[in-house]
Amino acid sequence: MLEFIILYVNNDAFDSSILELPESSRVISINNSDEALSIATDQPIKLIILAEHLSKGMSGNELCDKLAVNALTASIPILFLSNNFTSQSCENISKILPTNVSNKELQKQIFYMYTRCKQEYELLHDKNLVLSIVNKIHSPIFIITGKNISFANQYFLDFFNISALEDFSKKYPNVQDVFEYEGKESSFFSWIKQILGFKEDHKVIIKNFNQERMHVKIRGELLKHSDEYLIITQDITAEESHTKDLEHSFNTDPLTMLPNRLQLIKDLKNHNELALAILDIDSFKVINDFYGHIIGDFVIKEVALRISRYISHENLCFYRLHSDSFAILNKEHIEKEYFEIIIISIIQIIAKSPFIYKEKDKEKEIEIFTNLTAGLVFENESVLAHANLALREDKSTHQDYIVYHPDMKQEIAFKNNMEWVQKIKTAIAHDKIVPYFQPIINNSTQEIEKYECLVRLIDEEDKVISPYFFLEIAKHSKLYESITKIMIKKSFQTFTNSDLEFSINLSIEDIVDYNLFGYIKSMLSIYPLADQVCFELLETERIEDYRVISDFVTEVRALGCKVSIDDFGSGYSNFSHLLNLNFDYLKIDASLIKGIHEDKNKQTIVKTIVTFAKELGIKTIAEFVESKEIYDHVTQMGIDFSQGYYFSVPVESIK
C-alpha cells in the first residue's frame, strides 16, 4: 500500500488539524534545511512543501538546488512557498505558491500530488506484475528498438547465458546472427516488418553462442507511438523434436529400420529420371506358415541386410514396402543395362547361400533357401503401379525379373476390369450393393457402442464380394459416387430406430465432391441422425490441397456429425493431420495392431499415437483385433475401442 510521506520545511510547524490529508499520509515538519536534506535522502518522501525563507541552515532556494542534484531526491516533487520567486535553477519545483497560501489551496495541491503519486505507484505496481509474469513465461519475449534489443525476459537471458541485457551486445554484436529463418538474404529488420503482416505464427530457429538451437513460433507487433517491435515467441523445440521422431517412425519400417512405402512415395515425387525395382521374396507365405512368424521376420531382416551390404552407390535407395516386398530406387539417370545388372546381382546374392537361423538354447540350425523376383520400370508416370504390374507378370511367367512395357497393362488388366464394370452396373441396377456391419467395442464396458458400415456387392450367384475386388474399378469407371450414396442411404435407414453410433467410410473422391456433401445434408434432413453418424476419412494422404480436408471436416462437424481418420500409422498417414484437424476418432491401422502383443516396435509406435491422441482429446480405435491376446494388450495400452474378428466378422444386420 502507498505510504504518502510529506516533508514540510518551514519556520512554522505544520498544523494538521486545519487540513484534511489523504489516507495513508503523514507529515514530517521541520525548520532546519540541513536536517531536511538528510531526511529527504534517508526516507521515502513523496512530496516536499518548502518555504523560501528559513531561519536555520540554507535558504529554500539553496535547499532546492541541493535536492535537484542528488540522485536520491531529484525526482521528489516540491511545492515552493514564495512571494517573489525568481530563481531559474530549481527545475524540480512542481508548483509555486504564495507564502500565505490558503488552507484550501494547499489542501488542493496536496491532494493533486497525492493522486499523481498514487497513479505512478499503481502504474509501477502493474509494470512489476507484468514483468513478473513475462519473466515466468517459458519462451523468449523481447523488444527491438532501432538495431538493439531494449528489453528481454528471463527466459531469453537464460538461453543466451547472460545475467543482464547489457551483456547481450557484447556476445552478439549483430542481433541478426542469432536467428535462422527463410529469406536470410534480406535484412533482419526487413524480415521483422514482414512478420507484422503474417496472420499466422512464423517458425524460426534461435541459436546461442554454444550453438544450442531453439525452435520457436514467432510473432511481431509494432508498438504504437514508437519505432519498437515487440517480439513474442513460443518455444516449440520439444514439439518439433517429438514431431520429427514420429515422422521418422511413420517413414521407417520398424522391423528392418529401412525407409517404408511412404518415404518411397515422397522420393518419387522429388526426382525426374528414375529407375525403380520392386523385389518380392518367392513363396514367403510358405516360409511363414511352415516355420512361423519369428523365422519369417528373421528372413525379412536378413534379406534386407544382404541387399543393404551390396548397395553402396549414393543414388541407390533401399526400402521395405510391406510383408515380403522391397524396393530399390535410383534417383539419378542410369543406363537401363547397368540398373538391370545391379538387380540381377542382388537376385543372385540372395539365391547363392541359405539363411541360417539358430534357435535359442539349442544347437540346432535351420537353413532357409529363398529367391527374389523383381519388376523393373524406367519412367515417371505411375511408377509404383507399373513396377507392380511387371512383378505380377514376372511371377506368372516364373522369370527372375521383367521390365515394364505399355502393352503389359492391356494384356493383364483390360479384360478383368471390363468384367468387373459389368458386375458393378448389374449390382447397382438390382439393388445388390449393401452395407455389412462390424461392431466396435467400448474397451471400458466391453459393450457394443458403435458399428462400421462396410460395403459389399452381392453377385449373380448370391456370393458376398469384398470391396477389395471392385471398389477401385468403380472409381475409375464413374460408378463410385452411386455406391457411396447407396451406402449412406441404407446405413441411415438401418440406424433410424437405433441409439448406436455408426461410421461410414468416405474416400478422396467423396471429400472433393461437393454434390455428395449436399446429398449428406439432404439425408440428414430426412433421417435426423447427425449425433449418431461418424464419417471415416480414408486415404487422406493423397489429397494435395490440404484445405479440402479441413473444409470438409469443418462443414460436416457444423452439421453435428463426428469425423474419424482411418488406417492411421499405416505408413501413409501424415502426423500433421492430428495437429491441424479436429477429429473425434483415430483408427489405428491393422498393420500396427496385428501381432502387437509380440512386437515391441509396434507397441512403441502405438503407445506414442495413443498418448498424443489423448492429449488432443481424440478417442482411439484398434482395428484387426483378432485374438484375446491382442485385445488384452490394446486395452492395457489405453485404447478406447476395439474392432475385429475376435468379436465379430461384418454381419448383415445390427443387434
Image (cartoon, rainbow, N blue to C red):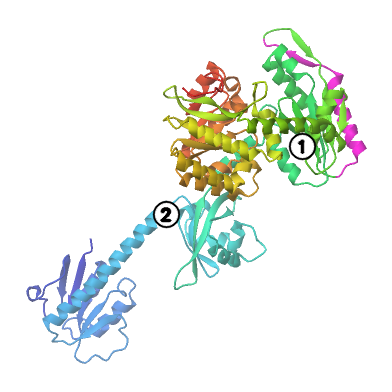
Tell me, for residue 135, which label it has, or none.
2
| Magenta range | 333-360
Q: CA distance from mark 1 to mark 2?
A: 54 Å
Q: Can residue 349 be seen in this snapshot? A: no
- Residue type at mark 1? Leu
Residue tagged by mark 1?
Answer: 384
Q: Earlier in the sequence, mark 1 or mark 2?
A: 2
Binning the other alpha carbons within 10 Å of mark 2 as few (below 14), some (14 to 19) or many (20 upward) gives some
107 or 251, nearer to the observer: 251
Question: Magenta segment: does it hold 594?
Answer: no
Q: Residue furthest left?
A: 17
Answer whether residue 347 is magenta in the image: yes
Mark 1 Cα-neighbour bin, 10 Å: few <14, some 14–19, many ≥20? many
Looking at the image, can residue 487 be seen?
yes
Residue 433 in picture, x, y percent from top left: 61, 30
At 56% from the left edge and 67% from the top edge, which residue is drawn? 193
| Residue 555 in the figure: left or right of residue 83 | right
Q: Position of residue 205 (x, y in %)?
A: 59, 53
Q: Secondary structure at mark 2?
A: helix
Q: Quadrant of residue 304?
A: top right
State the mark number for residue 243: none
Give me the residue at 53% from left, 70% from top: 146
With respect to residue 568, does 633 lie above or below?
A: above
